[in-house]
Image (cartoon, rainbow, N blue to C red):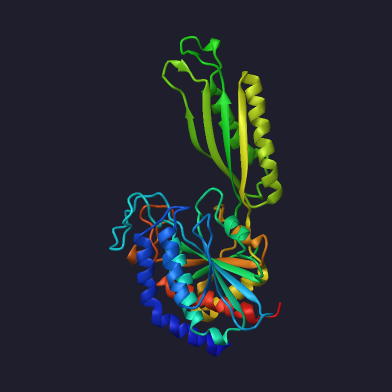
Amino acid sequence: MQNLKKQIFSQIDTINEKVITLRHDLHQHPELSGHEEHTKYLIKGILESSGYKITEFDTHFGLIADLEINKKDAKRVALRADMDALPIEEQTGVPYSSRVKGVMHACGHDSHTAIALGAAIALADYKEKLPGHIRFIFQPSEESKDGGSIQMIEGGALQSVDAVFGLHAYPYLPTGQIGYKYGVMMASADIFTIEVFGRSAHGARPHEGVDAILVTSLIVNSLNLIVSRRIDPLHPAVISLGTIQGGKASNIICDHVLVTGTVRTVNEGIRKNIPLMMEESIKGICKTMDASYDFDYQFGQPELINNNKMVDIVVKEAQKIIGKENCIDLLDPVMGGEDFSEYLQLVPGAFFRLGTCNETKETCISQHNSRFNVDDDALKSGMKILSAIALQTLTKDS
């Protein structure tokens, strides 16, 4: 197996510049969630020419690519890459900047796709020597509120899969390092909407109306007290209000306010209780102030929980490639969400961070920022680690 890995690594070295060029192409042509048409057909053409069996869908631009070996009872490992971009105007100034106004790859999904494609090409060159089947999941709409992972799962992405792995560009670690985490790695990501209904009146006669802005301000304060006073401080949680809209004129008592926000937790029990606590606060304040309300809470992606045995595989293989000192235990979860968590609810697997920070190249800017970029030097180690993880998983006893 070590000899096979060396051969695949050598092939990755050979195609590395082509993969970088591919990533630049993807970066120049970013597509928002649900619109990944150019990306899909670029991927499809490359993988079909490499001998992959492609599964397409009528309702979205995701695709599944299977590399099948001539052994029916062999294990199958899946590697996932997300493809969508963000509605942000790029300000990196790099020669391969986005050519689409108001859209850019500000989260590194172009690099995820390129890394997966490079690994797919290299693995296909040694198909006859592979110990099992390899599936690549190219997923749309990771950045959408619903997440594209559910669409892919419903389309059979995890059918007959024994393990699944994914990576994410990470500007908080230097290029040449990875970050891993046992157990809970990322938070659940839920969203909510609150509408407060009051009664309009002249601003000079507030006693004749019910001020929806005042009621909302009391609700905002009460929601911020939930985390600080009603939740065990040893279990992190976040309630953040993103938008508040209300009012028509400076001299009119507002009769309607719309609030939207997000909730993040790393504890499923607390997650289920938070909407109950939120509605208790909202209901009590509205009753006291003679207002009414509508509260809608949508559960999104669950916490991302890595399988410890799968993390062991990631760490051991990465240590062989980049050195033990460059494999960083991240220790604490982060409150960001990631819909890769949906795959891990159904199949053992692991998600890890690929360091992309290079101060000289200005690639240490956080994600979802107009100046975010990925260091191309990180792609090669990403390809090698993904390939090694796949091979090791296929040969490892269940």
Q: In which quadrant is the N terminus drawn?
A: bottom right
In the image shown, does 260 or 335 lie closer to the viewer? 260
Q: Position of residue 52 (x, y in %)?
A: 51, 75
Q: In which quadrant is the C terminus drawn?
A: bottom right
Q: Position of residue 134 (x, y in %)?
A: 58, 75
In the image shown, does 192 or 173 lie closer to the viewer? 192
Which corner quadrant of the image does residue 36 belong to?
Answer: bottom left
Q: Residue at x 53, y 54 (%)?
A: 59
Q: Residue furthest front?
A: 58
The reply, left or right, for residue 398 in relation to residue 18 is right
Q: Residue furthest bottom?
A: 3
Which corner quadrant of the image does residue 78 belong to?
Answer: bottom right
Q: Residue at x 50, y 52 (%)?
A: 143
Q: Is residue 265 above or below residue 42?
A: above
In the image shown, does 352 or 115 lie closer to the viewer? 115
Q: Residue at x 36, y 59 (%)?
A: 29
Q: Position of residue 293 (x, y in %)?
A: 61, 27
Q: Position of residue 284 (x, y in %)?
A: 67, 26
Q: Is residue 227 above or below residue 245?
A: below
The reply, left or right, for residue 392 in relation to residue 397 is left
Q: Is residue 236 above or below residue 51?
A: above
In the image shown, does 237 or 296 lie closer to the viewer? 296
- Residue 138 visible, this angle: no
